[in-house]
Image: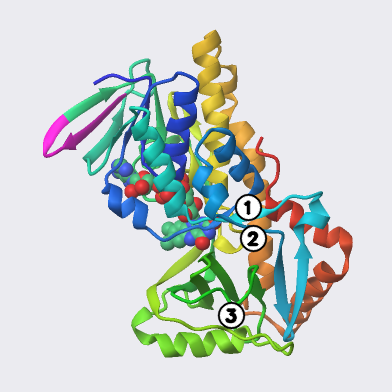
Amino acid sequence: MRTQVGIIGAGPAGLVLSHLLHLQGVESVVLENRSRQYCEERVRAGVLEQGTVDLLCETGVGERLKKEGLVHGGIELRFGGKGHRIDFRELTGGKTITIYGQSEVLKDLTNARLAAGGQIYFEVDDVSVHNFDGNEPKVLFTRNANPEELTCDFIAGCDGFHGICRPAVAKALTIYEREYPFGWLGILAEAPPSSEELIYAYHERGFALLSMRSPQLSRLYIQCAPDEDIQQWPDEKIWRELHKRLESTEGWKLIEGPVIQKGVSGMRSFVTEPMQYKNLFLAGDAAHIVPPTGAKGLNLAVADVRVLAQAITEFYKSGSRDQLNRYSEICLRRVWKVQRFSWWMTSMLHLFPDASAFDQKRQRAELDYVTSSRAAAESLAENYVGLPMA
Ligand SMILES: Cc1cc2nc3c(=O)[nH]c(=O)nc-3n(C[C@H](O)[C@H](O)[C@H](O)COP(=O)(O)OP(=O)(O)OC[C@H]3O[C@@H](n4cnc5c(N)ncnc54)[C@H](O)[C@@H]3O)c2cc1C
């Protein structure tokens, strides 16, 4: 089998890349080791930056997003039992975020690719990448237990943090990493969201976040140990903790409902430099991870592949490798700014196990500053709605 771009992974990075390349007349094949259903049901990110929404809408995959996405003009920072709104519209000249689950984004992209005759092979096994330092990169894999080979001009490693592409070029990469001494215990509950907008709560018992996926589904998180045993958290205990951490002196009430999904995830900041080696390009979680506090993971993946699609298109139009050679440099400038923001939000809002009384006073001062200074609030808002894509 031959194509122009072999894409490993049908997550947001792989599917958006395949879609953007198709619009420019560039062929690709996407290889995914999970089933379509598994990919479309995985509960993950849900906050889309303005730039991500614009890109999906401008490229024809935003119809359902426009209808069903919940547009939010701000978030609430809650501490000391009181809410403080950061008004994105007012602070950024009209920009917003949209709540639309990653699983919905993936459904829309998969449908669009398949309707356009795109090739996505789900449930492939034993994927390995070869010859990417030459002109005939190759991907080997098995499908229905039969060995197959895909030759291409470029390989895009969009296979997430645990994929095979980054390890294949590990020798050429430098890793920058920070692990956090806490994780998030998250639930999805059949309950209408208790607030129209997200609530980020700083509390002496630890951080809590109230988010949502739809008018019927709430997504809620509490800070926990990175290796927290979910078995020790029956639903009633989770709700009790959420009530305490989201407490309000302003008459606000948390609405409960049946918990339909729950899990614990650790938190890390991770960047690989460069994000490319010869004809293999890493994008999205394969190249970097952010703690979820800034809601950036999916958006960063989309920003990367936008740059990659432009560079590959430029190569096929003019034969020039200039943009391809600069792919990593262009992406990393934005990646590091987003890393900084995600680290900052995380550091401001979580209780660090070794925090001194001084650290906690400083955190409260930071929250007080962000919610009382226009300059500080503007900076949060500008980053939250999304920095320019490139
Ligand atoms: C549990 C969890 C919860 C999250 N919650 C949030 C959140 O609330 N907010 C937020 O902003 N971000 C969140 N994120 C991050 C966000 O979901 C990711 O940043 C985003 O999915 C990145 O997209 P991607 O395409 O780069 O990687 P992925 O979505 O990971 O896609 C990679 C794809 O490659 C496939 N793959 C892996 N290995 C192979 C292989 N060897 N062969 C073929 N295919 C392979 C995988 O099955 C997957 O489909 C969460 C992530 C996780 C893991």
**Residue at (54, 83) in percent of width and height:** 255
Q: Nearer the viewer, mark 3 or mark 2?
A: 2
For mark 2, does the 10 Å Cα neighbourhood hold few (<14), some (14 to 19), or many (20 or more) residues? many
- The quarter of the rendered structure image containing the C terminus is top right
In this rendering, is residue 46 above or below 150?
A: below
Membership of 182 in magenta stretch: no
Query: Mark 2 sits on what residue?
Result: 343
Q: Which mark is residue 339?
A: 1
Q: Is 90 left or right of 41, judged from the image as shown?
A: right
**Residue 237: horizontal and vertical position, in percent?**
45, 90
Residue stretch rendered in magenta on the structure: 138-147
Looking at the rendered structure, the number of numbered marks drawn on it comes to 3
Name which residue type carries label 3: Pro
The residue shown at (82%, 56%) is 90
Cα–Cα span, label 3 and label 2: 16 Å
Q: Nearer the viewer, mark 3 or mark 1?
A: 1
Q: Which mark is residue 353?
A: 3
Instruction: Look at the numbered discs 3 and 2 and tell me whether their residues touch, using CB distance below 8 Å.
Output: no
Q: Quadrant of the N terminus?
A: top left
Of residues 104 and 34, the one nearer the viewer is: 104
| Label 1 SS | helix
Task: Looking at this view, name the residue that lies furthest to the front.
Answer: 67
* Amino acid found under the numbered disc labelled 2: Trp
Mark 3: secondary structure:
loop
Residue depicted at 27% across the width and 35% down the height: 128
